[in-house]
Image: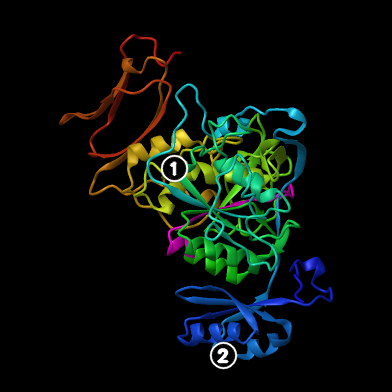
Amino acid sequence: MTHHYNLAPSIQSHSICFIDFLSITNHRQGHTFADSFDKNGKGRVISQKRHTETITAKINDMDKLKKDPNIEYVELDVERHAFPNMRGYEVVAGKGGRRLSEETPYGIDMVNPDSPTPRLQQGSTSIKVCVVDTGYDNDHIDLPELDPNTGGFSPYEGQSWSNDGHGHGTHCAGTIGAMGGNDKGVTSVNPDPTKFSFYIGKGLTDSGSGSSSGVMEAVQKCVDAQANIISMSLGGGAPTNAELEQYREHYEDDGVLIIAAAGNGGNSGYSYPASYKYVMSVAAVDSNKNKAGFSQFNDQVEIAAPGVSVKSTLPGNAYASWSGTSMATPHVAGVAALVWSHFPDCSNKQIREALIASAEDLGAGGCDNEYGFGLVDAKAAYDYLSNRGCGFSVGETLGGCDQCTECTSTPACPGNEKYFKLSLETDNYPHETSWKVTSPTSGDVLSRSGYEDSTTYTERHCIQSDACTFEISDSYGDGICC
């Protein structure tokens, strides 16, 4: 029998058996050792990466393993759990003779509004999103049906990824990809299942909790399945070296964008995996764009999304409105997939940069611990990459408010050139708006017109050093008006 142990200072003295992480780094024999350990029934291989072998081991082997000079560290497995803060009412489609017509949850309109410009539609490239959670109701009438043999993975004996005995994973999946246009239940950020795909990692059991080793194994299977994005509405208070190293390699080497819930403690505590710098930490806001009282706040919070009374799918063809940073996280994952589908040549780091650089600023001016860079905005992120393309460089991975290169620093320009940045929001008459930058020696050096209405544009250019005059004009003479 194995037991999970939460490595929180207040309970370290409890007499509980441990599962222990074993990571073997920078040794050729690591792979062979891990395989033999697994085959001999002494443990289980969690992940095998370029630089790290990670396996679980029994408490009886802990002292021996610590003394092995080829093993970098041995540490305790820790608990991970789902982050729903409040469960709302449930409605089952068709029960009692009721027919449920399709509705668009408010969160979808917040992150991808259809006014004043049309809602951003899915692009031509299919992006794979892996939901690591309590599972997925593969029989739900409003969710894409996945291949029962290849659509997911569960590390827990007797618990299938295609059965969600808790409901949390199915709810999160619905926000990302509930089917639209079928006159059923709810729609989602990615309503066309032919233009994106799911993979399911059952990182948590049907009880809503699990171990970091179980989550890590599920995450590894997501990467093996070629997932572009991993969405984790789960966490716990104790970091581990094994998790940090695995997520670093997935982010830096495998090109995967990892997104996780900031936590529901309503305090400044750190939750993991969200607070690792290789993971986007998501805060929750309500329908008025105010921070949810339960949403944790700290310097690793990077972005915000709707997380209060969010309606989505539940097992058994049901629907319910739940709250939590768990509910905010799939909004961000869904938007990331939506935007990435238009820019397949962009890297995971560039998609991350686009999401935070284009987010709608909330709370105090600029990035802050409560909202990060602000509310995720699909159309703004699309516009950001439309203007920039996928050729820009992204700085060091830092997480939180230090993550955005464009938001925190000025990119270097060649020679004596200067950096020029302009943010412009057009009105209903964009054809009247134009601007230019001039130099006393060479006249006009930069200019633009021909904008679309009611759109926010960000211009970034390197210009010659003696360019010193900026002029913006409205041909009608009433400025940015209405």
Q: What residue does disc 2 label?
A: 69
Q: Residue at x 65, y 30 (%)?
A: 287
Closer to viewer: mark 2 or mark 1 = 1
Foreground pick, 83 / 222: 222
| Magenta region, residue range | 250-267
Q: Is residue 418 visible in the rendered structure shown here?
A: yes
Q: Residue at x 54, y 88 (%)?
A: 70
Position of 399 with respect to 354 (left or right) is right
Mark 1 residue type: Lys
Q: Do labels 2 and 1 touch, CB within 8 Å?
A: no
Q: Indicate yes or no whether the magenta region holds residue 303.
A: no
Against 242, residue 148 (above or below) is: above
Q: CA distance from mark 2 to mark 1?
A: 49 Å
Q: Position of residue 191 (x, y in %)?
A: 52, 37
Q: Is residue 355 visible in the rendered structure shown here?
A: no
Q: Which mark is residue 402?
A: none
**Quadrant the N terminus occupies:** bottom right
Against 130, residue 3 (above or below) is: below
SS class, disc 1 = helix
Against 284, residue 435 (above or below) is: above
Q: What residue does disc 1 label?
A: 195
Q: Position of residue 456 (x, y in %)?
A: 42, 28
Mark 2 residue type: Pro
SS class, disc 2 = loop
Foreground pick, 234 / 425: 234
Q: Residue at x 54, y 48 (%)?
A: 401
Question: Badge 1, how many Cα within 10 Å: few under 14, some, many 20+?
Answer: some
Count of numbered tags: 2
Foreground pick, 69 / 125: 125
Position of 324 with respect to 229 (left or right) is right
